[in-house]
Amino acid sequence: MSNGDTLDKLVVFLAKRDGIDKLVKTFQYVSKLAHWGAESSLPELAQRAKSWETASGLSRKAFRSGRFLAGFNALRRGPVPVPGELGALAVLANAGEMVYFFFDHFTWLSRAGVLEPWLARRASFVSAFGEAVGYVFFIAMDFIMIRRGLRQERELLREGAKDAAEKEVRRIRVDRVMRLMATAANAADLIIAVAETDPNPFCNHAVTLGISGLVSAWAGWCSSNRQGGVFFKTCIKARMRLLSGVGRADLGIRKRTCNSISTTMIHQQVCQSFASVYCCLPVASNPWSPFRSWQERRFP
């Protein structure tokens, strides 16, 4: 099995569609924001944006066909020798993700008209619940690894500056940046899942869903960004699970490392992404009240 059996090869093949999924996800949530912004003033344009959002959502579900096999394959391989509590968290996280992707098939087929329409809501709830459970445990794993990295970095700095120690410190800091990005993406996806399982005015607002979707898509988009020495071969969340030795280790990417990363470039891109989305939103219906005064001064 070390060389990869049929299921291993199928998982690798299905993972190649992640880039298209992130692109279509960007379309989906940009159109959601466009529909919300034009609903009152330009109803015809808003309807077209809504159609684009619906089509993008169905397309993404089609792209994710068979993705539950990744979680199943990770569970099939049995427990990975991971220190501490990460082993149990990895099993729970992969199980939640497998439930999410599996029931997502029924949601897609129901909304496409293949299955009964009433099945869509039930399958969507179960899928979102599994998604939320998986993201909670993935976030917990990232925080545990960040904490361990901070302790290891402090110990290395106390020992004194050596070439090997400096190289290890740089690796720890790069790993921390990537884990923080993965945590942001997981938290954004968690908000979207909560909006489905436990609807509330904040999580279900178009602005919250739109920005959360774009944050998640942006984290995956950075996986193929070469600027500033950044070139991640897989999406950020998959990379985080591989670095901890759990999840999709069968993809054969665990040995690849990032030698350099420009945190300044990442910070600028994040700020520009949030500004470009947020500053275009009308002030009157903006639920994010702490930013209203700034927006009124910026756009009188």
Image (spheres, rainbow, N blue to C red):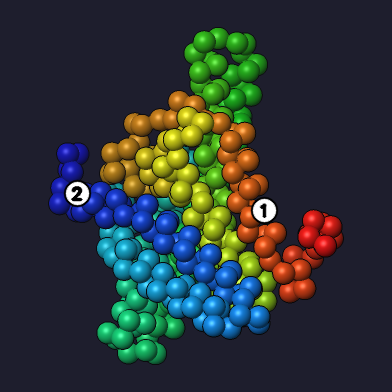
Locate residue 273, reporting x and y percent.
Answer: 60, 51
SS state under label 2 = helix
Q: Can residue 7 be seen in this snapshot?
A: yes
In the rendered image, which residue does mark 1 sit on? Answer: 275
* 3D distance between C-alphas at marks 2 and 1: 41 Å
The part of the image, by quadrant, that contains residue 241 is top left
In the rendered image, which residue does mark 2 sit on? Answer: 9
Q: Can residue 236 be seen in this snapshot?
A: no
- Which residue is the extreme one toward the left? 6
Q: Residue at x 66, y 82 (%)?
A: 40
Q: Residue at x 48, y 41 (%)?
A: 84
Q: Residues within 10 Å of mark 2 (few under 14, many from 20)?
A: some
Q: Residue at x 48, y 60 (%)?
A: 26
Q: Amino acid at mark 2?
A: Lys
Q: Quadrant of the C terminus?
A: bottom right
Locate residue 101, reporting x and y percent.
Answer: 36, 65
Q: Is residue 262 left or right of residue 238?
A: right
SS state under label 1 = helix
Q: Residues within 10 Å of mark 1 (few under 14, many from 20)?
A: few
